Amino acid sequence: MIQRPRGTRDFLPDEMEARRAVEGDMRTKARQYGYREVCTPEFEELELFTLRSGEGIVSEMYAFQDKGGRWVSLRPEMTAAVLRLYVNEARVWPKPIRWFYFGDCFRYERPQKGRYRQFWQFGAELIGADTAAADAEVILLAHDLLSSTGIQFDLQVGHLALMRHILSPLPDESRRQVRALLDKRDMAGLSRFLSEGDYGLMEDQLTALSEAHTLEDIFAVTGDHPENERLIELCSLLDAAGIDYTLNPAISRGLDYYTGVVFEAFAEGLGAENQILGGGSYRLAHLFGGDDTPSCGFAIGFDRVMVALGDREPSSARRVVVASTPAGRLFATEVARLLRRAGVITEMDVTGRSLSAQMAHASKTAAFAVIIGQEEAQKRSITIKDLSRGMQQTLPLDEAVRELFSGTR
Ligand code: HAM
């Protein structure tokens, strides 16, 4: 038996239906904010990601040389591709541009619960606005999308400038290492790293910053900073919208392209892989040949949301099996087409089984059976059997279709 590759999953119909339902709700919500869906290739030129996505993600990429000798990679995330699309096709469009996407991404990570090598992201990018209102809109959309799924989550909002201000005395490489440790929330590792480099004061400041959860406490650590105003305005907009969030100025984000406001969301009960959303403001368009364009966006780890939701009731759409005798078969074919056209999920026997075997199969797989024998075919009526209650009635075709349509919804 051939097994599927490590870190990938198969989805059976119940799970697929649950995923499609959640995905559909997210699409509806994103459209309500004026966002429109885009789709980009699953592989891109490797350079698209090496330009600015950061070490972590680059070392996890599924990169390879194609038959023409070009270096390409399966996408580890979608923001870089969406910004490439913007530069290629939409840079003269009226701004801001509001786009969303849903697609699979690939990262060569050590698989565990909630961490896969192929996983799906639902994301949004607001391109061409650099205001607290833009940050607020994107955060509100993220919050609404997660709320619409019904999961419990903690949304945390920070600003990279505050952290960068504290880390500014460090050489570039050390700054990168400190941010990676902060992103992993490895405070012991951070302490070791900073004390080795004789940056004890910085450690105190970072500890104070990571414990500051009000604007006053944050500004007490960072002092006067040009970005303070932005954070104040953002908080007042989020407060006006009435959403729950926590200020966390220690958020550092694993990707290198972020420039300002950053945010993450965490769900309960997921263990180590509890981050279900990450995003922030960033600049990427200029790296791909466009003008320097401020943008803000996020991606939801769709699979983690599904894990957090747990097993749910299989789809409520109920099925009908049309069972017939050989004499009723042609009329049964007509009836099945009619039911499907009326929106009823309808199956018909394709194995040539006897009527009783068709009924036995229907009792295992469907909510209703439609029984058609010679008499029904002659009278153009059908017998409907409610399989859970065992009741049956014979009705003229039109009436039966109406009955089944209401019964299966
Ligand atoms: P990210 O934080 O790397 O950000 O990924 C976003 C989310 O994808 C994570 O919060 C997590 O839920 C999910 N995720 C990441 N890796 C895995 C994995 N191996 N298995 C399952 N889920 C995973 C980005 O990708 C940015 N592009 C977000 C963004 C959009 N920033 C601005 N615009």
Image (cartoon, rainbow, N blue to C red):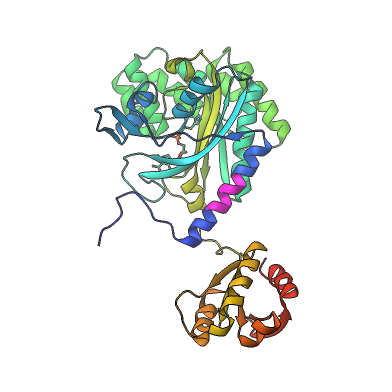
The residue segment tinted magenta is 20-26
Q: Locate residue 152, reporting x and y percent.
A: 58, 48
Position of the C terminus by quadrant:
bottom right
Q: Locate residue 84, reporting x and y percent.
A: 46, 24
In the figure, is residue 206 to the left or right of 329?
left
Looking at the image, which is closer to me, 378 or 162? 378
In the figure, is residue 327 to the left or right of 391?
left
Looking at the image, which residue is at 44% across and 77% down? 351
Q: Is residue 197 above or below residue 151?
A: above
Looking at the image, which is closer to me, 42 or 5? 42
Looking at the image, which is closer to me, 398 or 229? 398
**For the image shown, how many numbered marks are present on the structure?**
0
Looking at the image, which residue is at 63% across and 47% down? 148
Secondary structure of the magenta portion, mostly?
helix
Q: Is 307 covered by the magenta stretch?
A: no
Q: Locate residue 63, reporting x and y percent.
A: 29, 33
> Quadrant of the rendered structure where residue 46 is?
top left
Looking at the image, which residue is at 62% across and 71% down? 334
Q: Locate residue 403, reporting x and y percent.
A: 72, 73
- Say whether residue 178 is visible: yes
> Quadrant of the rendered structure where residue 256 is?
top left
